[in-house]
């Protein structure tokens, strides 16, 4: 049953019941329309209430129907809203908890709206690269005013119902319920049962006293804030139509046209891909959703450095007590001071209230003694990235931690199975690779060892949601998903320097493509010595793997990046502006000459495709090997951890948009370059197979 029908006194109550958020799928729309018809045909019924079961009025469209014929099957949402508007008897929306997207559009079609305090209200379609498609841009300005409505539509963020109800002149809510929202709606239904004519939002006017100037200002603003996305600008166009169209139906037709056009754009497809990929990432094929979870009420973090402090803040923010352990008091004091400083900066900017800051700090404790963390449910080590150091830590944890505690490593490249072998409880060991700064970056790579227990995985994935991380499961390999791929990206960047490019040309090319930062600026930010240490290990372990020597020469000059004031770029003390360095360019030219390479002009297109397709080819190997369970997981790692442009949908999705046949053909051309690594450009088996079959990754 997706919408139930019952009669209470003289009022028919239609309850949307399509868990988890009462999505307006075909069956729900059909049952709701039938309920309206049934109520109108019943002489004993004088009014109708629509509400939602469980924890939502309605979250909007049913995402399970996206892209399927059911999404457009009649009655579609526009048709359902017309049924509601044309009802002979008043229809009252009893809104609670969540009212978003199509759910809000349905409520706007009702004659009256009663709302519970604390309800999250939004039109979030812009986050999928769309405009609202069932009247949201036309009706919301009529009830909230043009400026408030446009801000909500362009941002797509939820607003609390009490904030909207307090706006002067608002006509969105007729009543804010003090008690049960359904009871309040039933009471209003009795009051308005005989009131005619029935009030319709479509009959209200949407006006702005300085419309032309305001909408031009709005267009300029969204263009600057969302230059890679067409949807925000189209939202402005649609709301403007609400003020200029002859009637609501003309405005609805304009909105629908914009919705359909945006649905076909690569940007919307990329955003929708990311939306589904994020939800799919939380599902592990062989770990059922009802797998019992371990209780996590206390967390311990080993190490008070930048990473340890950032990791701790995630749990403090979620209200989970944290104990930080260090070997020296000075290190503890420094770590706590940094956490305080971070929180105080948020308080100063108005992003964090003083009482919340006090509460979070009260959950933090410190110790120099492993015995003080023995009762923690989860312990995460964030110590130096060296196997011998990890061995000592995990050996000690094995001795002191209570049975059933989860032992996690924040390692970014090391073998989690090897780390697990330092204990007598490998089933309790898992990788939790946070990205720096750990209190800001969304990505959490959850590394599954060969003996990691399923309940450990289920617990960590659930905990990731609680601390607002996007968790992606990776198998064990050197570098896991993200860092294994970035190594190939960095190798290509080095080869491009040897062949004739400059660091700034490479960075600007990929930044124009949409990356937050090019590979050389990224190296300067992270510290070039980190990559140097990895390459030194590679020279021993994989002597056949070729690298450009430019990065080594840079480090030999002591140019480790921003922390030393010099890397691929020069830096002025106290600033992060990357200034092209004549010294670096001279070093590159000299090295080029020693190799006997005559520099050539390299196009931005070649730069972008060599860098991005190196990610794609390595990503295909990772999926083929089962390190990632699906290509969309690779995309989520790069969208949330490496600054890959959201409007491209991740490297694997981008490859799909280019056509895998074309990707393979381009890679074959790269393999002919005598200064590149021909063996690397051999298409990964999965990529070659999909291209040959005319298929895609996703």
Image: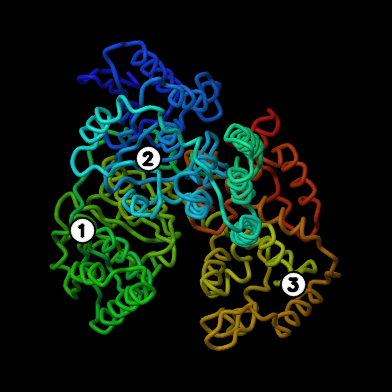
Q: Residue at x 74, y 64 (%)?
A: 496
Pick whichever, 635 or 693, lies toward us.
635
Quarter of the view holding residue 188: top left
Q: Secondary structure at mark 3?
A: loop
* Residue named by callout 2: 99
The answer to which of marks 3 and 2 sits earlier in the sequence is 2
The answer to which of marks 1 and 3 sits earlier in the sequence is 1
Along the horizontal axis of the image, is 330 left or right of 246? left
Image vertical order of residue 569 relative to residue 310, above or below:
below
* Residue named by callout 1: 398
Along the horizontal axis of the image, is 517 left or right of 692? left
Residue 460: percent from left, percent from top = 30, 49
Q: Residue at x 41, y 64 (%)?
A: 440
* Residue named by callout 3: 502
Residue 334: percent from left, percent from top = 30, 82
Image vertical order of residue 527 relative to residue 41, above or below:
below
Residue 325: percent from left, percent from top = 23, 71
Number of callouts: 3
Kindly tell me whether residue 685 is visible in this rendering. no
């Amino acid at each position: 049953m997706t919408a139930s029908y019952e009669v209470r006194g003289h009022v028919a109550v239609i309850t949307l019941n399509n868990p988890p958020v009462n999505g307006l799928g075909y069956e729900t729309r059909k049952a709701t329309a039938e309920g309206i018809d049934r109520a109108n045909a019943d002489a004993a019924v004088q009014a109708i209430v629509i509400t939602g079961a469980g924890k939502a009025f309605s979250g909007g469209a049913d995402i399970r129907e996206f892209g399927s014929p059911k999404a457009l099957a009649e009655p579609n949402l526009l048709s359902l809203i017309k049924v509601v508007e044309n009802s002979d008897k008043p229809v009252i929306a009893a809104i609670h908890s969540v009212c978003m997207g199509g759910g809000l559009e349905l409520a706007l079609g009702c004659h009256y709206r009663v709302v519970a305090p604390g309800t999250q209200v939004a039109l979030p379609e812009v986050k999928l690269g769309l405009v609202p498609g069932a009247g949201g841009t036309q009706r919301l300005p009529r009830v909230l005013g043009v400026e408030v409505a446009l801000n909500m539509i362009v941002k797509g963020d939820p607003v609390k119902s009490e904030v909207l109800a307090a706006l002067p002149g608002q006509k969105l809510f007729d009543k804010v319920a003090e008690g049960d929202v359904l009871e309040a709606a039933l009471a209003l239904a009795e009051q308005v049962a005989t009131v005619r004519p029935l009030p319709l939002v479509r009959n209200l006017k949407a006006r702005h006293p300085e419309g032309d100037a305001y909408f031009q200002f709005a267009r300029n603003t969204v263009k600057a804030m969302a230059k890679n996305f067409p949807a925000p600008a189209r939202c402005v166009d649609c709301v403007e139509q609400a003020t200029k169209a002859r009637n609501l139906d003309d405005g609805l037709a304009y909105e629908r046209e914009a919705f359909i056009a945006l649905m076909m754009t690569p940007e919307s497809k990329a955003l929708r891909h990311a939306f589904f990929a994020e939800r799919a990432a939380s599902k592990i094929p062989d770990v059922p959703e009802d797998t019992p979870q371990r209780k996590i009420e206390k967390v311990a973090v080993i190490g008070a450095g930048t990473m340890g402090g950032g990791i701790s803040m995630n749990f403090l923010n979620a209200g989970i007590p944290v104990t930080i352990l260090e070997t020296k008091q000075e290190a503890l004091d420094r770590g706590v001071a940094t956490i305080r400083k971070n929180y105080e900066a948020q308080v100063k900017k108005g992003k964090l209230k003083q009482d919340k800051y006090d509460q979070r700090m009260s959950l933090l404790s410190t110790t120099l003694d492993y015995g003080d963390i023995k009762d923690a449910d989860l312990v995460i080590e964030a110590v130096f990235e060296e196997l011998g150091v990890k061995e000592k830590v995990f050996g000690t944890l094995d001795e002191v931690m209570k049975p059933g505690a989860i032992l996690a490593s924040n390692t970014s490249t090391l073998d989690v199975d090897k780390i697990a072998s330092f204990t007598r409880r490998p089933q309790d060991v898992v990788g939790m690779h946070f990205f720096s700064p750990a209190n800001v970056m969304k990505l959490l790579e959850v590394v599954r060892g060969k003996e990691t227990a399923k309940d450990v995985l289920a617990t960590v994935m659930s905990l990731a949601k609680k601390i607002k991380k996007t968790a992606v499961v990776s198998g064990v390999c050197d570098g896991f998903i993200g860092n294994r791929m970035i190594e190939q990206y960095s190798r290509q960047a080095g080869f491009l320097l040897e062949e004739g490019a400059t660091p700034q040309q490479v960075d600007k090319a990929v930044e124009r493509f949409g990356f937050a930062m090019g590979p050389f600026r990224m190296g300067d930010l992270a510290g070039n010595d980190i990559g140097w240490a990895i390459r030194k290990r590679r020279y021993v372990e994989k002597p056949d793997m070729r690298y450009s020597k430019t990065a080594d020469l840079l480090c030999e000059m002591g140019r480790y990046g921003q922390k030393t004031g010099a890397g691929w770029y020069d830096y002025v003390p106290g600033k992060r502006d990357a200034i092209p360095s004549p010294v670096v360019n001279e070093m590159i030219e000299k090295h080029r000459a020693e190799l006997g390479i005559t520099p050539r002009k390299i196009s931005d297109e070649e730069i972008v495709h060599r860098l991005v397709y190196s990610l794609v080819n390595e990503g295909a190997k990772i999926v083929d090997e089962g390190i990632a369970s699906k290509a969309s997981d690779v995309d989520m790692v790069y969208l949330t951890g490496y600054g890959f442009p959201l409007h491209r949908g991740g490297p694997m999705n981008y490859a799909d948009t280019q056509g895998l046949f074309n990707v393979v053909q381009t890679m074959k051309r790269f393999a002919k370059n005598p200064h590149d690594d021909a063996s690397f450009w051999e298409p990964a088996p999965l990529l070659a197979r999909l291209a040959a079959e005319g298929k895609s990754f996703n």
